[in-house]
Amino acid sequence: MSFQSPAYLFLLLLLIPIIGWYIYEMRKADASLQVSSTDTLRRQPRTLRLYLLHIPFALRSIAIILLSIALARPQLTNSWKSESTEGIDIMMALDISGTMQAEDLRPNRLEAAKNVASEFILSRPNDNIGLVVFAGESFCQCPLTTDHAVLINLFRSVKFGMIDDGTAIGLGLANAVNRMKDSQTKSKVIILLTDGSNNRGDIDPQTAAEIAKTFGIRVYAVGVGSYGKARVPVQTPVGIQYMTMDSEFDEGTLRNIAHTTGGEYFRATDNKSLQQIYEQIDQMEKTKIRVREYSKRTENFMPFLLAALCCLLLEILLRYFALRTISN
């Protein structure tokens, strides 16, 4: 049950001063009589009139409660809702080569990519999401799963040096395709994030893109890196030293991969633009939800109004007939 005008329920607060006034009047109306002994009075049976003495006030209080509820317009709601969701498969292919340590994104490219991707995963509760990492080689860090808590923990454990350095874009993309090719889901997507040019692996990136197209997989390619120079930490015998490198990579290849598979190419030059890219992908790959909803509201104030009128009528009958008093 719901109320169309719930503000009228505040009228119930009127009962507080009304009850206080009634108690005060009853005490003031008590008469006193001096007698030598009350034993005889105690043995007298209580009359029906005495039992009914407070009934009229109780009926009036109940009538006020019922009228307040009626004014608030209680409504009965009959509704049903059926919802069916269809998640999609998303495989994230993440570059973890040495150049992803560049600090043009904060704290560096890899950590920025991990943080934004984790938020993206949490925003897609109905999807199967997995993770492939690549550098000079590639392996699956997490297969497609709906257990996103496990996926995020595995995501956070990704770090530099897990595999040989290099940039095997084609191998990483082919590995992601291999993990999705047998899926029966209607919509399959790979988010490929890298900051380099393909220089390792036995599979050409364009060949991997053609394979993805064959299996109906769209690839959203994300190139990471600002324009100009970027600082990269390098481990040396005397500790970590910083070197400056040109922030350039093979954008043409990434564009071709996206175009071949029906996806899009994006360039992330800072943390904000990287987050906006994931937001765009999130909007383009919305989970399909079919909802059928029915709702019917029925006014239900009449029973409360009739009950209030009955209480008032019964109070009048008791007060002016059964409990009638004669005053001078």
Image (spheres, grey):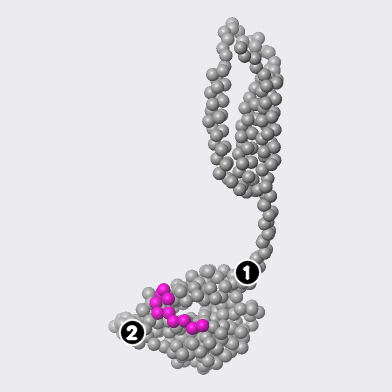
60 shown above or below 292: above
Residue that numbered label 1 is attached to:
289
**Residue drawn 62% across the image and 48% down it:** 2
- What is the spatial separation of the Cα atoms under label 2 and label 1, in whole angstroms? 45 Å
Residue 208 quadrant: bottom right
Circle 2 sits in a helix, a strand or a loop, which is it? strand
**Residue drawn 56% across the image and 75% down it:** 285
Q: What crowding class fits label 1: few (fewer than 14 Cα within 10 Å), some (14-19), or many (20 or more)?
A: few
Does residue 327 show up magenta in the picture? no
Residue 87 quadrant: bottom right
311 shown above or below 106: above
Does residue 268 show up magenta in the picture? yes
Between 76 and 269, the one lying in front of the other is 76
Amino acid on which the number 2 mark rests in the picture = Lys
**Residue 155 visible within the image:** no
Q: Position of residue 23 (x, y in %)?
A: 55, 25
Which residue is the extreme one toward the top? 36
- The answer to whether the residue labelled 2 contacts the one labelled 1, judged by CB atoms less than 8 Å apart, is no
Amino acid on which the number 1 mark rests in the picture = Ile
Q: Position of residue 172 (x, y in %)?
A: 51, 86
**Residue drawn 37% across the image and 83% down it:** 227
Q: Nearer the viewer, mark 2 or mark 1?
A: 1
Residue that numbered label 2 is attached to:
229
93 shown above or below 201: above
Between 325 and 189, the one lying in front of the other is 325
Q: Which residues are magenta?
A: 264-273
Circle 1 sits in a helix, a strand or a loop, which is it? strand
**Residue drawn 54% across the image and 36% down it:** 13
| Disc assigned to residue 304 | none
Label 2 or label 1, whichever comes before in sequence order:
2
Q: The C terminus appears in which quarter of the rendering?
A: top right
